[in-house]
Amino acid sequence: MRILVVSRADDDRAVSYASGLAGELEELSHRVVLEEALAKRLGFHGTGLGEARADLVVVVGGDGSVLHTIQGLKEQVPVLGINWGEVGFLAELEPAEAPGFLANLREGFRVERRMRIAISLDRERLGDALNEAVIVTSRPAKMLRFTVEVDGILAERFRADGTLVSTPTGSTAYAMSAGGPIMDPRVDGFLLVPLAPYMLSSRPIVIGGDRVLRITLESEKPAKLVLDGQRTTELARGAVLTVHRSPDPALFVDVGKSFFDKVDQKLRRL
């Protein structure tokens, strides 16, 4: 297999681990390519995420590294995360587990498809998000006013510090911290969560994956849209965001671990 190895480049131990793992993969007769930031740290020439052609991407890092990698891929390919962060909910394997798992990995391995949401601003496509799209004010302690439509029908009007739209995968991230429910990643739907809403009646809503969500920013105050904590877009009053299921889901190597075991081990026992 052709395997792209990615690592957080700000941690010397992670870089060293990724380098050793790349060597082990080459010894297993895989063709290994290093992502350019990792390669630069090691003194080699690497490949950009948008240019990579691989059968598998191995990411050494935390959830941010996994999200950055998925955002950067031009075409989605299976990703295997090795946890080098604090929680690592998207990184399925711990460093000690990874070499043995990869030594036994063969072509035809099982892949789990994870919903992403596609976001457009005034009909211009901005990109996809695996975790969430967040709208927040650019001025602290200032509230925003939103109108929300589902399939063209008015569903909600509210004032809040912001709002986010989360996938089932992202329900264990920012959305959970903001009071949203944890969703099984197999659920075909996404989640709208107001952030610190002014009215008690403004509650999280689970929306079917086949529906189209439209959010209009009605406030004069400047705001920002952030996708997966990676990409930021400035929003003006009257900005209209359209959200629907992306046709290009993220792909993860299925390592055989239960989602509910991960919730228990990584969220309830921190």
Image: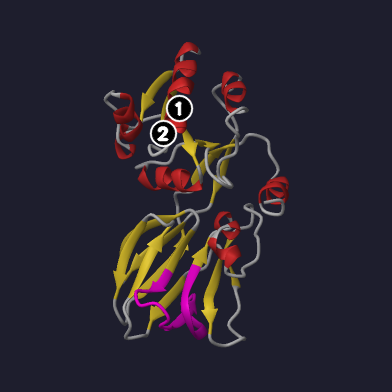
Q: Is residue 238 left or right of residue 55?
A: left
Dot 2: element: strand
Q: Where does the image place residue 65, in percent across and percent down from the top left?
A: 44, 44
User: How many tags in the picture?
Assistant: 2
Residue at the far left: name it.
45
Disc on res. 141: none
**Image-quadrant location for residue 168:** bottom right
Q: Which residue is mark 2?
A: 6
* Residue at 47% from the left image edge and 43% from the top image edge: 66
Task: Say which label, 2 or 1, has the lower sequence index.
Answer: 2
Q: Is residue 188 magenta?
A: no
Q: Which residue is mark 1?
A: 18
Name the amino acid type tagged 1: Ala
The magenta stretch spans which residues? 135-164
Q: Where does the image place residue 244, in percent across and percent down from the top left?
A: 46, 63
Q: CA distance from mark 2 to mark 1?
A: 8 Å
Q: Residues within 10 Å of mark 1 (few under 14, many from 20)?
A: many
